Image: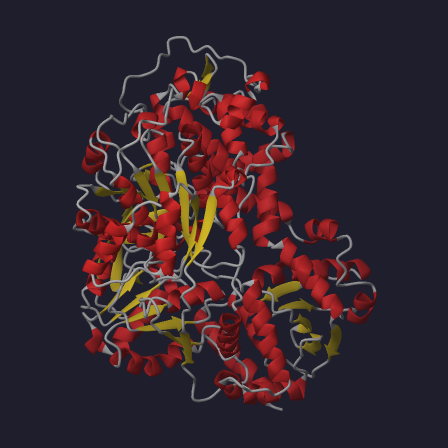
Amino acid sequence: MKNIHPAKHWFEQQGWQPFPFQLEAWRCYLDGYSGLVNAPTGTGKTYALAMGILLEGKSPLPTSSLLPTPSEGGGEGSTGAAKENASHRLPPTVPRQSSPGLTPPPLGEVGRGLEAGPSLLAIWITPIRALAKEIQSSIQRAADGLGLGWRVAIRTGDTTSGERARQKKNPPQVLVTTPESLHLLLAAKGYSRYFENLRAIVVDEWHELVGSKRGVQMELALSRLKGMLPALKVWGISATIGNMDEALAVLLGNTLETGKYKVVRAKIPKQIEIESILPDDIERFPWAGHLGIRLLEKVLPVLENSKSTLIFTNTRAQCEIWYQNLLEVAPELAGAIAMHHGSIARELRDWVEDALHQGILKAVVCTSSLDLGVDFRPVESIIQIGSPKGVARFMQRAGRSGHQPGARSKIYFVPAHSLELVEAAALRHAIAQGELESRIPYIRSFDVLLQYLVTLAVSEGFRPEEIYEEVKGTYSFRSITEDEWAWCLDFITTGGQSLDAYEEYKKVILEDGLYKVVSRRTAMRHRLQIGTIAGDANLTVKYVSGKRIGTIEEWFVAQLRPGDVFWFAGRSLELVRIKDMMVQVKRSQKKTGKIPSWQGGRMPLSSQLSSSLRFKMAQLSRRDLADVELQKLEPLIELQSRRSHVPDEEEFLIEYFQSREGYHLLFYPYEGRFVHEGMGALFAYRISRLQPISFSIAMNDYGFELLSDSEIPIEEALSQGLFATEGLSKDIPASINAAEMARRRFRDIASISGLVFKGYPGKQKKDRHLQASSQLFFDVFSDYEPDNLLLLQAYDEVRSFQLEEARLRAALRRIQRQRTVLSRPERATPFAFPIMVDRLRERLSSEKLEDRIRKMKLQLIRD
């Protein structure tokens, strides 16, 4: 057994005692295993793997396990699978192209090389830059304590060009970086020499990456490093999720086949106490968003009684609103509270994080930007504004307080409307039952694969037979066929069937069996676009004097004119001008102004929370009011019961009534707005086949409404199999505008795959231009190349992630097993009201909406 005594001794010097899971992780690492450490926030998970890496550093450096680079012919450096297939390697699928007058350029724009120097021994991947500083500090502290003389450095998008150049010439022993920065290193000439002594790679917060294209990006980078370094140890650190086995499989890929892996579990119970901030009176006709800010006065005592508090909001707009309102109600907090979200400038966020560390700030209003593992020991209390819509997200946020092993975490829940109190009770139930969400991995993301292949071509070039075996060894691309691989190679060299007439898309050439990029312009543009985080075009907000404040989305700025006032980063700002993707502003004394909102801020209810929510609704139907939140809701439930019905677990409620607006048909599956979007369209389509009828559809996380100006034949629809799963694969595309949804999805796919170029720094293309470009490609592929893999991917993503087809199918099966209760109330019920308000919200300004809601309530209160 390897000697772990130095690590135990160093822990003792700090006054610490290693946990059993840390000792187990050190031993597994030193015995050469790959694997996954499953530990909650605040349990010392960083040292569970960092110590193994440092202890190994006390042993002699092995000779390089990397042999010839791809440009030197593969040889023993190829993966075992590639060697086995050497006799029947894939033939080159793209004819060799001649490029007269083009020779590989010198090191420079294309070939920014990585020079050999001291060895890089370990890479530590973090999904967000905010974590890098603390991880670097923790590992450096331990390395110094063990007397290793190691340097631990950070490379992210915030790292200066000078520091990056120093790291190339004189690599640190441990590099803390992001998935995007790792791919940038793979895009540099000499990367194979730079990584040749790499012993381990650790992917922190793996649960955050596994359900995104950044996870696919990591899989591909790992496949290359494992291909070069067969002895490389790959480890992940993950909080508990519902599909831990699958998360492990995604991380390790074909390493699972070796059997040389371990899962190390912390088994440290985390106590979470949930206390809801209850309104004095319950609105019997609730609507989303109106309640939260009205409870602000009840939040102030929590701030006063805590040394420091994190106030989590679900959107950046909500973050800005709460910060502004807190200062208005309690001006004495000025200077003692701050705001933190992803659109605020990095320098400001760094200041906020440092001030939290030092215990200077009384409170920080934040978004998911502070969800992950940065350790803010002074934080005593957590406040959650509105439902987080997921159990794991709620637990992660609660864990920011009591951020020590065994410490109790307390979180205050502030409902955005009355019915969200049921979600507080549901969250408590789900946590007690250990019901956590799965993170569905992306598979067959060809946009990410195409970007990766050009990355390899930009640096040292690649041999297709070698990279094919590595790619096929990943979870995401284990089903890739030789024909699909050939399509990918053809796409990066000729632009594929539809674009072969355009030189711009002939990015890669084939020379002596090696695929490589020789154009400096292509290489530069590719490097600028490496990454999979897509979103709306952002404009930088700066004072006229030049100081940067942050970024806001182009669509919001397009609504403003010079002289308009808006609130951003907690400041009242007046728009001066928009110039070269720069929003120039000056401070304003006005107290009112628009607040930016960001597209895609609404999160759908997770399946685990949906299940717990239905359980709590059933308790309400039985008047089993064990939770204080359910007791508070009794007046609302009484009215719902009098007017209609409160379903139990075995029942599915449908409400049908008429108003001056028309005929309202409401369903309550409690499955989240994404599923309800698909289910609403499906039911509307199936009903319209019985009788020509048009609907408007509205939904929230609890149910959805079909509104028509003519009577709806609901009994006939039920008798004809409205909930049937047979024919679902045909009915879903027929019921929604699948092409339009796929077209919207394709915009990000076009950007990631390199079909559209977003522009150079400071000169980004306008959002509408990018949208127009991607739509043009979508139309061309739809008309002339319907089997284009990127086009097919767009439709797959709509089915899997937007409509959540698998979850929709499961919900229909559940509804089929339940007894349908068709209620015919005389007018809208407390359950129906918030859905009807959501429909109006899309059409009315906030002032007109509130006025309309008051009138609706007056009509409904008459009982």
Q: Is residue 728 visible?
A: yes
Which quarter of the rendered picture does the N terminus lie within?
A: top left
Which quarter of the rendered picture does the C terminus lie within?
A: bottom right
What count of labels does the image hold? 0
Give coordinates of residue 598: x percent, y percent: 41, 57
* Image position of 639 with respect to 296: above or below: below
Give coordinates of residue 94: x percent, y percent: 54, 17
Q: Determine whether, in the image, residue 744 is placed left or right of residue 154.
A: right
Please tell me which residue lies in front, 63 or 325: 63
Where is residue 356, by image quadrant?
Answer: bottom left
- Give the colour scheme shown: secondary structure
Where is residue 767, by image quadrant?
Answer: top left
Give coordinates of residue 35: x percent, y percent: 44, 47
Please tell me which residue lies in front, 103 or 553: 103
* Image position of 302 with respect to 225: above or below: below
Give coordinates of residue 279: x percent, y percent: 43, 85
Please tell me which residue lies in front, 840 or 521: 521
Q: Is residue 440 visible?
A: no
* Image position of 721 with respect to 236: above or below: below
User: Which residue sits at x=67%, y=76%?
Assistant: 649
Q: Determine whether, in the image, residue 505 is placed left or right of residue 344.
A: right
Residue at the top extreme, as displayed = 100
Q: Determine whether, in the image, residue 15 is placed left or right of residue 448.
A: left
User: Which residue sits at x=60%, y=78%?
Assistant: 617
Where is residue 178, by image quadrant?
Answer: top left
Residue at the front extreme, as displayed = 1
